[in-house]
Amino acid sequence: MTEKLTVSVLGTGIMGAAMARNLARAGHAVRAWNRSRAKSEPLSAEGVFVAGSPAEAVEGADTVLTMLYDGPAALEVMRRAAPALSPGTAWAQSTTAGIEALTGLATFARERGLLFYDAPVLGTRAPAEAGQLLVLAAGPAEGRPRVTPVFDAVGARTLWTGEDGAEGSATRLKLVANSWVLAATNAMGETLALAQALGVDPQSFFDAIGGGPLDMGYLRAKSALVLDGRLTPAQFAVSTAAKDARLIVEAGTAHGIRLDVAAAGAERLERAAAQGHGDEDMAAAYYASFDEAG
Ligand code: NAP
């Protein structure tokens, strides 16, 4: 039998809300907090305790799960939680924070005696809701009994990448995977935009590549969001994807390589956000090919 834990979920946006729900369904005592309370309130129907502050949320926690927008947000929220955090608590840090911010998060954990798990996830809204994420995790063996049941509740599989969360091995793998996802998303958007500009029916493009090695389920799924106008609710929002694209570009720069496609992709996502598509699914980067907001 899996041990039942008290798990605090800080950040209940697209991903965090789904993760909190699945933790509650797995029988864990879940204490959730979100900056905008309206996004955490519905979780009370699932038996989740909705806290009024990060400190209240982490009271009595075996494990704290952070799923915030970026590294600075995760650090700020953990600082607010600090007065109620006990040494020895496990911290599963699932926000896509990037390599640079990870150092500050790991330092915070070390200074407060927390067991730090670098634990970004692969998979978007639908797999999060289904508890089918892939968790990439690095952290000490000592606290694994308190994070493994958490990862099992939110994910289909956990891929352990190391024993020291501060080394960022899970975050580095996450950035590599996101580099592929974002390149594919941006290529899809540009290809559809080119088809439209040239008067090519997108279906004839799909027919041309159908069944061959260049056909991809991902291409079909993301194209359908654009072509059918189903860009909300977002699986993964344009503005969050733009943040991740910048983390990838920065990682490349810091390690002495050029990532031209990633840099152009970041610009496309930022332009789409500036056009008013920031809260739509990242497939809306398609609109960055056109001068006016779509
Ligand atoms: P989201 O719905 O926008 O959620 C972001 C969360 O961060 C919200 O709870 C938001 O609070 C909170 N937040 C932002 N800035 C904050 C601040 N300064 N202080 C306190 N809270 C703050 O995004 P998401 O898609 O769930 O993504 C969450 C994380 O998971 C991101 O790091 C993202 O890169 C990563 N991720 C996303 C996906 C995906 O497909 N969606 C997949 C894998 C990983 P409010 O509600 O008050 O704005």
Image (cartoon, rainbow, N blue to C red):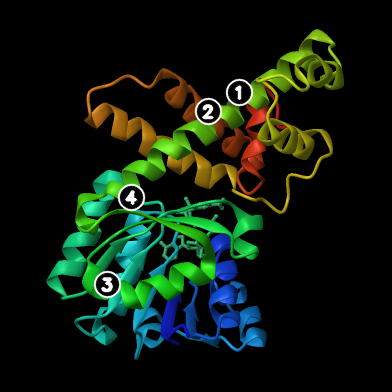
Q: Quadrant of the C terminus?
A: top right
- Asked if the residue under mark 2 is in contact with the one under mark 1, i.e. CB atoms within 8 Å, the reply is yes
Query: Which residue corresponds to mark 2?
Result: 183
Q: Quadrant of residue 48?
A: bottom right
The amino acid beneath tag 2 is Ala
Q: Mark 4 or mark 1: which is in front?
A: 4
Which residue is labeled 4 in the image? Answer: 170
Amino acid beneath label 1: Ala
Instruction: Indicate which label's residue lies in the foreground, 4 or 3.
Output: 4
Instruction: Using the image, tell me which numbered label, if any, was put on residue 79.
Output: 3
Residue type highlighted by circle 4: Ala
As helix, strand or loop, the secondary structure at mark 2 comes to helix
Q: CA distance from mark 1 to mark 2?
A: 6 Å
Asked if the residues shown at circle 4 and circle 2 are in contact, with their CB atoms under 8 angstroms apart, the answer is: no
Instruction: Identify the disc placed on residue 99.
Output: none
Q: Which residue is mark 1?
A: 187
Q: SS of the residue at dot 1?
A: helix
- The x and y percentages for residue 244 are 44, 42
Q: Amino acid at mark 3?
A: Arg
Report how far apart the C-alphas of labels 4 and 2 lie in the structure: 20 Å
Q: Residue at position x 57%, y 70% from top?
A: 17
Q: Nearer the viewer, mark 4 or mark 2?
A: 4
Residue drawn at the location 25% of the way across and 79% of the way down: 82
